[in-house]
Image: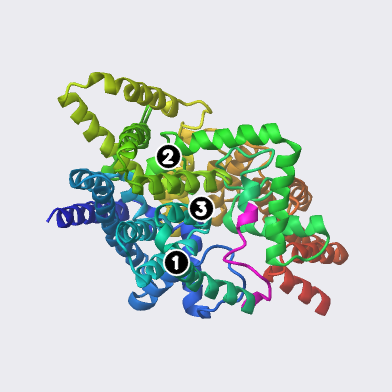
Amino acid sequence: MWQLFILVLALALRLIYLFQIRSADPTFNFPIMDALYHHEWAVSIIQGGWLGKDAFFRAPLYPHLVALLYKLFGTNLLVPRLFQCAIGAINCVLTARIGAFLFRKKIGIVAGIVASLYPLFIYFDSELLIPTILIFLILLAFYLMLRQSATAGSRIGWLSIGIVFGLAVITRPNILLFLVVLPFWLYWNLRKQIKSVLIYGVLGVILMIAPVTIRNYIVSREFVLIAWQGGTNFYIGNNEYSDGHTAIVPGTRTSWWGGFYDAKRIAEAAVGRKLENSEIDQYWMNKGFEWISQEPAKAFMLFLKKTYLFFSGFEIPNNRNIYFFAHLTYLKFLLFNLPFFRFPFGLLFPLSLVGVLFFVRRDQTRWLKKKRRPHPWLVLLYMGVYTFSFILFFVCARYRLPIIPFLIIFATFAILHGADEIRKKRYKQLTVPLLLFVGTYTFFNADIFGEKKTNPALDYLTMGTTYKKMGRIEDAMRAYAKAIEANPNMAEGYYDIGNIYAERKDLTEARKWYLKAIEVNPRSAEAHNNLGNIYFESGVYDKALEHYQQAHVLEPNYESPLYHAGLVYKYMGDYARAESLWVRVLDINPNNEHARYQLEKLRRD
């Protein structure tokens, strides 16, 4: 009965949020960044075939799952979100079952209710992102493994566990690191049956990974185990300019595909030839290790910073400001970012550490009596290895979600065990745990690196861009105005208003707003480029070329100023200059159809 209560509670909360955010957030039907990538990948699978044409850049399970849902129910962005709400509710029940197994039934029930209410779970269950499915696979694998290891188990059981872990690996390859150390725990606790455990468990993992590896080889003729994103991500988190959480390769564009193509181009320019995907992966991996070897002290300090950020109370955004969009719904009552009160993670993590301390104390006593419970140690091993696997790269809020169900269990244990100690008047037993809680709460809720301040300017900008796509131009203008109000130094706000006036053919107003953007940020290549377009349309060719040149100097791989400068030279009768510029555009992006058309037309004429 209690499991049904948790399931219904969790599902109801998720569905209420889903339909609230659907009404309040204009980006709901216009996903951005990683969510857009997953959606477009799923659509391409349906349209272009399930095999695909290139080695996977990212782990494939989630986009293929979304594609399957689109195939069954139509390409509707609501469908995968409804599915994830259901899976998210099941995750809460699994959290409760695991909590009951690790400690006792009461702890499991409370942990399941807390998981149902946990705002980040609710938030990400409605995002077209990986966490919900990954959490489900990890919780399911642990639930099956805890049951198997507590009994004699069966070969089919361990094969099933291997299959679930294998699915988790092709969802998030970092899980492989945990699977490398897991056999040591299994050997220590299941020595008598270790042979069959390992054989069938490993077989299950291989059965899931091997098809991905074979498929990658068939389509690309190169060995890519799962995906070739790892090297790029490693360098993002290990370079001179890394802040530990911003997911951008230095020197590349901030847009998803712009950064993708720039990272490939930089690697190929450095090596001096076209590279295979696996070679690009290795290039950036080597660059990261090269920096670590050259700057070990800086690398170590960055590692410590990433560790702090991973466990800090602040929810570090990756694609968009979690606080801004969550606060469009009832989650504003469950999610806070106040000085020394970053709720809920800022409270959850210190409490979970107290729970770990209580468990270690109790297990030491049971060890002496030969009644120890090894299973919580397995959970601690997983959390440690998983955390380490991400701190090696870079961190953000959604990357830590797969350890939160277990943190909730330990935090619940801390509260209930602490209450038992108070009832028994064993106050001395609470001294060290209380000091641990106060110290870690203060430390991880502080703003040591100045990362915990949020500004809604970028989020208003995102909303404005979405309103514009929807044809709601006046709403877009208001959103851009709010972005400028929130941050008067955000050049993009002025730039986007200029774009609206340019599309209305109000060249005077457009020029005014582009000039404001350049005044705020003289290094805005986009503003220089579009101001050049205004001068081009006005017939002021010398000023147009001046701003195209400035845009090119600021971003040498920016195609638009080169392409439009070519048009200017064509109209001026300098066909040789026009041709050379369009050739350069195609060198940067061979898929630029506008440049290809102009070049072919010029050579034909």
Magenta stretch bounds: 219-232
Quadrant placement of the C terminus? bottom right
Q: Which structural element holds mark 3?
A: helix
Say whether residue 268 is left or right of residue 175.
Answer: right
Residue located 41% across and 27% down the image: 440
Calculate the distance from the C-alpha at mark 1 to the C-alpha at mark 3: 13 Å
Evaluate if marks 2 and 1 touch, with contact meaning CB atoms under 8 Å apart.
Answer: no
Question: Label 3: how many residues lie within 10 Å, few (<14), some (14-19) or many (20+)?
Answer: few
Q: Which structural element holds mark 2?
A: loop
Quadrant placement of the N terminus? bottom left
Residue 453 visible in this rendered orientation of the protein: yes
Q: Give the foreground label among 2 and 3.
A: 3
Residue located 47% across and 55% down the image: 182
Label annotation for residue 34: none
Which residue in the structure is indicated by mark 1? 201
Residue located 26% across and 56% down the image: 89
Residue located 68% across and 42% down the image: 239
Q: Is residue 225 magenta?
A: yes
- Seen as rendered, the residue at the extreme left is 1
Which residue in the structure is indicated by mark 3? 181
Q: How many marks?
A: 3
Q: Earlier in the sequence, mark 2 or mark 1?
A: 1
Q: Give the foreground label among 2 and 1.
A: 1
Calculate the distance from the C-alpha at mark 2 to the C-alpha at mark 1: 35 Å
Residue 605 visible in this rendered orientation of the protein: no
Say whether residue 357 is left or right of residue 206.
Answer: left
Q: Residue 198 at what x, y percent from top left? A: 47, 65
Q: Earlier in the sequence, mark 2 or mark 3?
A: 3
Which residue in the structure is indicated by mark 2? 315
